[in-house]
Amino acid sequence: MIRRWLSVLPTRRPLAEVTRELVAVATGKLPADTVIKGGKVVNVFTGEILPWDIAIKNGRIASVGDVSAAVGPETEVIDASGYYLCPGFMDGHVHVESSMVTVTQFARAVLPGGTTAIFMDPHEIANVLGMDGVKLMVDEGRELPLKVFATMPSCVPAAPGFEDAGASFGPEEVAAAMQWPGICGLGEMMNFPGVLAGDPAVHGELRATLAAGKPITGHFAMPADFQGLAGYTAAGISSCHESTRTEDALNRLRLGMYAMMREGSAWHDIKATIKSLTETRVDSRRAMLVSDDTHPETLLSTGHLNHVVRRAIEEGLNPIRAIQAVTINTAECFGVAQDLGAIAPGRYADILFLKDLARVAIDKVMVDGRVVAAGGRLLVDLPAVAYPDRVRHSVHLKEPLTPWHFRINAPAGKSRVQVRVMEIIEANVNTRHLTVTVPVVDGQVTAGVEADLAKVAVVERHGGNGSIGLGFVRGFGFKAGAVASTVAHDSHNLLIVGMNDADMALAGNTLAGCGGGMVAVRDGQVLALLPLPIAGLMSDRPVEEVAARLAAVHRAWQELGCRLVSPFMTMALLSLPVLPELRLTNRGLVDTLQFKMVDLITG
């Protein structure tokens, strides 16, 4: 990957290299590079708002309060009168790939809204391209003005034995990655059954991370199992973003975890989880606000962490506590509080200028002591990024798809059968496990508009055995046609949902031909297509272009009858066998409460 950074930002220097200069500025012996005067500083340590000025040297804060002695003839003085000043926002759990753009384009979208650091978990690309994919994304983020940290993906595949991915990680890969620059911990440990069962490979990954002195992030998706959560925490797992109820977040806080409360494009959990703070007196310093998965149009139209913070405030959280949950709390969770998360001496000068605190109205964004965005516009150039050709050809089907591949044969002599059905819950990561009676036509179990049942297929696409899992889903509202996506968590096989087998075959073959993406078809015609050639997950086109093409796919979904607000992520999780209650992989249906494969036809 070739990068040429055209930004005017200075080279980022570690604290150990600049201590003498910072002290000299703080004691009036050396002039500051920049002084910010007249603002009201949000102190995330004490929860106060203070009338402090700020002196900056070498991209870091040298002093606060009365810094008049640091003003020299060459010092840039910024008038912040009328502004609240708070630390840059930090996303403690995000999958950049879910935004369908490169790390660079993600930075373009989120910096103007106040996100100055992310802790990404690149397990989407890891499941397709393995260590090579992780390293490509980590390297891309290393010289951006957005500070990009990465957790090493822990579950590749997410559920071994239940699905087939493009790679497989174990303790050796994790131990090796812990030595890479930019790797700050272990990505979400989705294999919570393996943790609780004492699986040697799982605990080998935990051991490698703890031995490196880095945190383990979690994914515990059994909300009613407090004792299981306690055991999971005992393994050294320090955070979890899978809270969907008030009591989920409270339990994590009470056990000493960082409770990550999520608000993304599809998952709107803040309304319930924030009550763990607003309706109790618990300390909020282990609460974090995160996005998890955000689509490009959401980033452009609604925002990123600025939106998540705003939602928490709308639900009754004190604005300063909300800001703590995306600044100092996040920095402490990942052990970087000496550098980030506060407006305080020694920290990087990542500072937001807010016109209105409660409305999170961000006017200017400073990174490393330089204003990089103002009025919602990025003011610096970002690198030109070229991904290698080898990542653009990742859809390897065993053979072209035909309608025959999607036939579900009924037992001989049956006119009706009972089948297991995944029922989606809008704006929620979970599904319901239903048993539904459906008709048999010409010996085939069929989808049905009247019952809101669509057929689902997950096709292995990594050049392996070419296996296909078949099932049914309720809740999309499709009346005709088919949709397909290579964004299918977490193994990212080819996922197809449709009302007839011919359109399902066309949708799948269309994506195989363009290297992956999302498509909607009807009656043998492609209605809309979003190519995602980088691992079948991301585009290297500008985020605005990707958002526009995704909007066209959304309109096509609506033409097919779907009225969900954010259907793509809901569909993408149908194949993730670590979420309740029923999922489909290329190997078949998985009962994720019992963690076992189950038959589609039950009677």
Image (cartoon, rainbow, N blue to C red):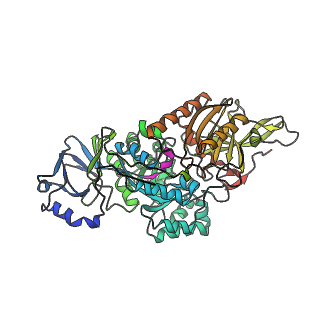
Q: In the orientation shown, which residue stands out farthest toward the right? A: 413
Kindly indicate the quadrant of the structure image that contains residue 46.
Answer: bottom left
Can I make out residue 235 in this image? no
Give the number of marks: 0
Instruction: Locate residue 450, reporting x and y percent.
Output: 70, 29
Q: Which residues are magenta?
A: 92-101
Residue 529, how many percent across, how many down?
Answer: 57, 36
Instruction: Name the image quarter holding residue 141.
Output: bottom left
Does 466 appear in magenta? no
- In the picture, measured across the screen, residue 369 lies left or right of residue 194, that is left
Which percent across, then down, holds residue 279?
42, 46
Residue 495 seen from this side: yes
Pinpoint residue 598: horizontal percent, then vertical percent.
73, 51
Q: Nearer the viewer, residue 560 or 429?
A: 560
Of 158 and 138, which appears nearest the observer?
Answer: 138
Q: Residue furthest top?
A: 559
Does 99 appear in magenta?
yes
Q: Residue at x 14, y 60 (%)?
A: 30
Q: Write down the quadrant of residue 215 in the picture.
A: bottom left
* Image-based side of 193 in relation to 359, left or right: right
The residue shown at (45%, 70%) is 212
